[in-house]
Amino acid sequence: ATLRSKMLLASFGAGLFASSIGRLAKLYGEQERAQQKLSIQLGGTSRQLLEFASSQQQVTRFGDEVTISAMATAAAFTKNEDEIQALTKASMDYAIFTGQDLNSAVETVSKSIFSSTNLLNRYGIQFTGTTGTADRFNNALDAIRKVAGGLAEGEAGTLNMALFQMGNAIGDLGESIGSIFVPAIIKAAEGLKALSEFMSESRVKSYGTAMIIAAGAFEIWNKGATLAAAKTAIFNKT
């Protein structure tokens, strides 16, 4: 009975976690993961880039966690924070222009700038400059501006933009609420992990065998009781 109760409690707890608190914690976790990814790439936390991500969320469709994650991709190509910021902003326009997600756009723009292969050429964005030079960096961003400049912030005032920003605001609220539950969730996760480890294959098999035997015994008892009741009824009539 104790083992069965533990299994039921674990099942109930997992369902509650996934349907409510778990979703809020996941939002917080995504933000935390994006910031950690950027910090690892840079070798430390950049207040400048985090503030940039927050400011861009106010004027574009891109949530701050999306921008932070994309900047971490850019940081694999350059550690210069001003370059990361300028590259990311240009990539937002490029993402709207091509229909790509921001991370893919940043990766494409970064590879085009910091290698000899211009992947932007497929969209008619051409530029010159020796790989690794400031000229190539600046020429690439200028070329993007000529084709897609202002597209990201140009969505301001549209219904589409309002819906994106509403979603971002709800996401931020979820992150804030999720952060409150983090300590309790960590403890709960440790408890569920311990229970999962306790429920070894042999214990599960033993529990299953016991249930089968109990079910068989009940069936035999039920048939016996039914037969006895029938015999008693016959006896009472005589």
Image: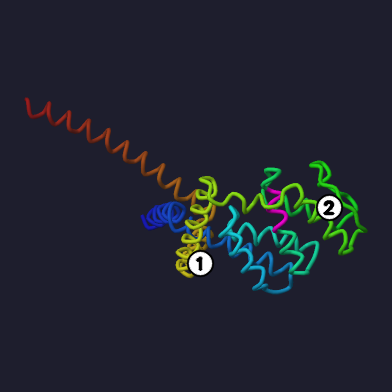
Residue 161 falls left or right of residue 79: left
What element does badge 1 sit on?
helix
Pick whichever, 113 or 212, lies toward us. Answer: 113
Residue 129 falls left or right of residue 153: right
Pick whichever, 56 or 100, lies toward us. Answer: 56
Above or below, comparing residue 195 to residue 105 in the picture: below
* Percent x, y of residue 178: 47, 63
The residue identified by callout 2 is: 112
Q: Quadrant of the N terminus?
A: bottom left
Q: Label 1 crowding class (10 Å Cα cut-off): few <14, some 14-19, many 20+?
A: few
The number of numbered discs placed on residues in the rendered structure image is: 2
What element does badge 2 sit on?
helix
The residue at 48%/53% (across/down) is 166
The color scheme shown is rainbow
Above or below, comparing residue 230 to residue 96 in the picture: above
The residue at 77%/51% (across/down) is 144
The kind of residue on which mark 1 rests is Ile
Pick whichever, 137 or 43, lies toward us. Answer: 137
Residue 170 falls left or right of residue 111: left
The residue at 50%/61% (across/down) is 172
Q: Quadrant of residue 89?
A: bottom right
The residue identified by callout 1 is: 186
For marks 1 and 2, the one nearer the N-term is 2
The kind of residue on which mark 2 rests is Ser
* Percent x, y of residue 63: 58, 57
The residue at 45%/64% (across/down) is 177
Pick whichever, 12 or 176, lies toward us. Answer: 176
| Residue 136 drawn in magenta | no
Kindly give the residue lying farthest to the right in the view shown.
130
* Percent x, y of residue 76: 78, 62
Magenta-tinted stretch: 89-95
| Inter-mark Cα distance, 1 to 2 | 42 Å
